[in-house]
Image (cartoon, rainbow, N blue to C red):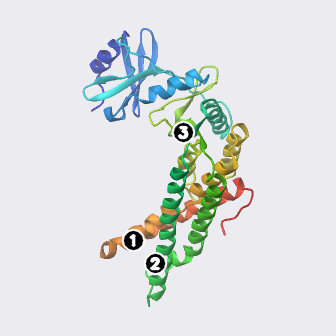
């Protein structure tokens, strides 16, 4: 739907028994000034639903309270459907940052570790389920390795290489090394767990970001935006964050290493969990996808754009390699 009008805002807030006076737009949220205080009204697609509330309630039951609460409407529902859009209401936090750059990330990862630690539970995993995941993942990655080798041969057969082919040949060895490292870590994970009957799961936030970690008046950090929360392996919160953070020009991401180490110090991963984490983290899926798209596009290729994308994903690969090496104590992908 379009932006809320002042009347829309008043109508929605009446469903909460609040008298609204004024609002300001902040992305997908509105800062609502009401007689009873200042609130955050968040809008989400109806198909997203309010199922994430049960994850928040579960965390509260486990003793984790660093979550911005979601207020129920007068009828008891946590979400209000208005003109085809779903809204939910929270208190507005000032989110004033007074510490040095990077300190907020450390606090966020410390809180994430606490969240995972309080929500952790063992679940039954059948040997067949584990074996199927291993075999399907391994087969997919081996097919990728075959494709990379075949595409390299095609490039080398060209009398005059295209800019993309030339760059790919330059990067091939490092892409292949990263993929082989992922395979070895996957194999190590399976060797360690193939006889295990259980695995650890936690409540994962789904999209950790400093934008979703807000400070109250006392400087305490609270998680917001639990819309993608689910029960999964602990590192399911780490992988997307690292992928977004490392998608940048190449540099030594020592601060990123420190953030993850902060998490590990409060919620250590088991050895088998580390293997699977490093396997997924190191896997060069983004750059492989660029090569596969280039191959599939044929005559419709846009050479300059795909060369730029290949270079960009190579930087991601190198940044990831550095972080993996630091976190795995120098186990270089070779």
Q: Nearer the viewer, residue 72 or 319?
A: 72
Determine which residue is flagged by label 3. Answer: 208
* CA–CA distance in space, label 2 to label 3: 37 Å
- Cβ atoms at labels 2 and 1 below 8 Å apart: no
Q: Quadrant of residue 188?
A: bottom right
**266 to 283, vertically: above or below:** above
Q: Residues within 10 Å of mark 2 (few under 14, many from 20)?
A: some
Mark 3, other Cα within 10 Å: few <14 / some 14–19 / many ≥20: many
- The local secondary structure at tag 1 comes to helix
Q: Is residue 4 left or right of residue 272?
A: left
* Rendered location of residue 323, percent (x, y): 66, 55
Residue on which the image places disc 1 = 294
For marks 3 and 1, give the CA distance.
32 Å
Residue 302 visible to an observer of this rendering: no
Name the residue: 68% across, 49% down.
Answer: 257
Q: Nearer the viewer, mark 2 or mark 1?
A: 2
Q: Looking at the rendering, in which quadrant would you find the C terminus? A: bottom right
Sequence-earlier tag: 3 or 1: 3
């Amino acid at each position: 739907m379009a932006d809320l009008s002042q009347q829309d805002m008043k109508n929605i807030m009446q469903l909460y028994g609040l008298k609204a006076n004024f609002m300001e737009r902040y992305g997908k949220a509105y800062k609502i000034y009401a007689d009873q205080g200042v609130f955050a009204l968040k809008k989400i697609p109806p198909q997203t639903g309010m199922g994430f509330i049960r994850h928040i309630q579960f965390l509260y039951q486990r003793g984790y309270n660093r979550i911005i609460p979601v207020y129920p409407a007068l009828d008891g529902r946590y979400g209000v459907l208005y003109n085809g859009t779903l809204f939910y209401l929270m208190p507005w936090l000032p989110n004033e940052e007074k510490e040095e750059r990077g300190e907020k990330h450390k606090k966020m990862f410390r809180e994430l570790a606490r969240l995972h630690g309080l929500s952790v539970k063992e679940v039954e995993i059948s040997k067949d389920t584990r074996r199927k995941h291993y075999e399907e993942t391994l087969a997919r990655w081996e097919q990728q390795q075959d494709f990379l080798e075949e595409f390299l041969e095609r490039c080398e057969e060209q009398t005059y290489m295209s800019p993309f082919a030339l760059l790919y040949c330059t990067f091939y060895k490092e892409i292949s090394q990263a993929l082989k490292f992922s395979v070895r870590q996957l194999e190590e994970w399976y060797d360690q767990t193939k006889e295990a009957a259980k695995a650890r799961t936690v409540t994962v936030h789904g999209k950790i970001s400093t934008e979703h970690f807000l400070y109250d008046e006392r400087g305490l950090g609270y998680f917001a935006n639990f819309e993608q929360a689910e029960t999964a392996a602990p590192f399911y919160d780490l992988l997307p964050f690292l992928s977004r953070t490392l998608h940048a020009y190449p540099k030594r991401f020592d601060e990123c290493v420190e953030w993850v180490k902060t998490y590990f110090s409060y919620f250590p991963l088991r050895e088998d969990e580390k293997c699977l984490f490093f396997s997924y983290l190191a896997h060069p899926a983004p750059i492989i996808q660029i090569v596969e798209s280039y191959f599939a596009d044929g005559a419709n290729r846009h050479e300059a754009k795909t060369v730029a994308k290949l270079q960009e994903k190579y930087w991601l690969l190198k940044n990831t390699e550095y972080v993996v090496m630091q976190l795995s104590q120098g186990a270089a992908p070779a």
